[in-house]
Image (tube, rainbow, N blue to C red):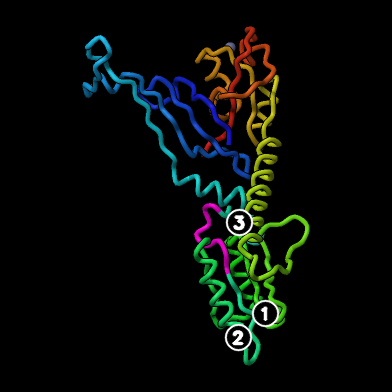
Amino acid sequence: MIVSKRPSWDKFPGAEYTVALDVLMPDGKTLQVGTVHNLGTNFAKTFDITYEDKNGEQQYVNQTCYGISERCIASLISIHGDDGGLVLPPEVAPVQVVVVPILFKHSEDVMESARKLSERLSKEFRVVLDDSEKRPGAKFYEWELRGVPVRLELGPRDLERGEVVIAPRVWEGERRRSVDIDAVEEEIKKEFENIEKILYEKALSSLKSGLKLCSTIEEAKEQVMKGIAIVGWCGEEECGHVIEEKCSCDVLGEPVGSEYEITECVVCGRETDRCVFLGRPY
Ligand SMILES: [Zn+2]
């Protein structure tokens, strides 16, 4: 996501200023997922909220407020999902590990071991044992669709060898591998770290490739159709509105904590080092 200070005409009413978090969605539009407002003393004055300072005098408090929207779930689904369905980061996945027993005739041993393994893993992870009647392939498909980060497969041959097959939802290198059943907790943790890293890097690179510094209105107009444009802005509200109108977009705000090489306002040509993100919000 990008973090920016909303323009004065788009801040929370009554706030000194608003900082917002916008996610660049795969279709090139932006989704506001959270905001932080600096309310200054505006609300303290209205509601008479004061404190006593060191000189014994009453002062109005400064306040902030913030909100994270459920839309962060929508962005998580869109950004990380793939053609196989949901892809959930392990930290937020309701089910982190699914255990799928591979059953043949007379495989009570396998079912019993799968049950024990699930119970053991439940101490550390959110685990589901899929003991339904479905075929293993159908189970794999369903749990992939639901974005479960790690699948464990346990069949008679694995059991004989004291192993279990581990298959992460996203991977680099090996898709599936056999691991020692007694050390599976460590292997799951390794996979979790790996998944978080893969998802983060993929998301970061798609955000970076969707951002472009533009030096003309025409260039910015084209860029906002597929992502976020960055343009020089003198800080005048009038120039901000000209940009919004000519590019059919919103001024999202001034970047917080990022540096771009800016020399002039894209509208009036005045010298400036300030800039704004432009996008098409949902
Ligand atoms: Zn200007």
Q: Earlier in the sequence, mark 3 or mark 2?
A: 3
Q: Is residue 94 rendered magenta in the image?
A: yes
Q: Position of residue 222 (x, y in %)?
A: 68, 31
Q: Give SS at disc 2.
A: helix
The type of residue carrying mark 1 is: Leu
Residue at coordinates 54% horizontally, 19% vertically from top-left? 240
Q: Earlier in the sequence, mark 3 or mark 1?
A: 3
Q: Nearer the viewer, residue 267 or 42?
A: 42
Check mark 2 vs ligand 1: CB closer than 8 Å? yes or no. Answer: no
CB under 8 Å between discs 1 and 2: yes
Q: Quadrant of the N terminus?
A: top right
Residue at coordinates 54% horizontally, 79% vertically from top-left? 131
Q: Which mark is residue 159?
A: 1
The type of residue carrying mark 3 is: Val
Check mark 1 vs ligand 1: CB closer than 8 Å? yes or no. Answer: no
Q: In this rendering, is residue 232 above or below 212?
A: above
In the rendered structure, the answer to whether residue 93 lies left or right of residue 36 reads right
Q: Magenta region: which residues? A: 91-98
In the rendered structure, the answer to whether residue 185 lies left or right of residue 38 reads right
Q: In this rendering, is residue 149 above or below 230?
A: below
Specify whether residue 198 is in view: yes
CB under 8 Å between discs 3 and 2: no
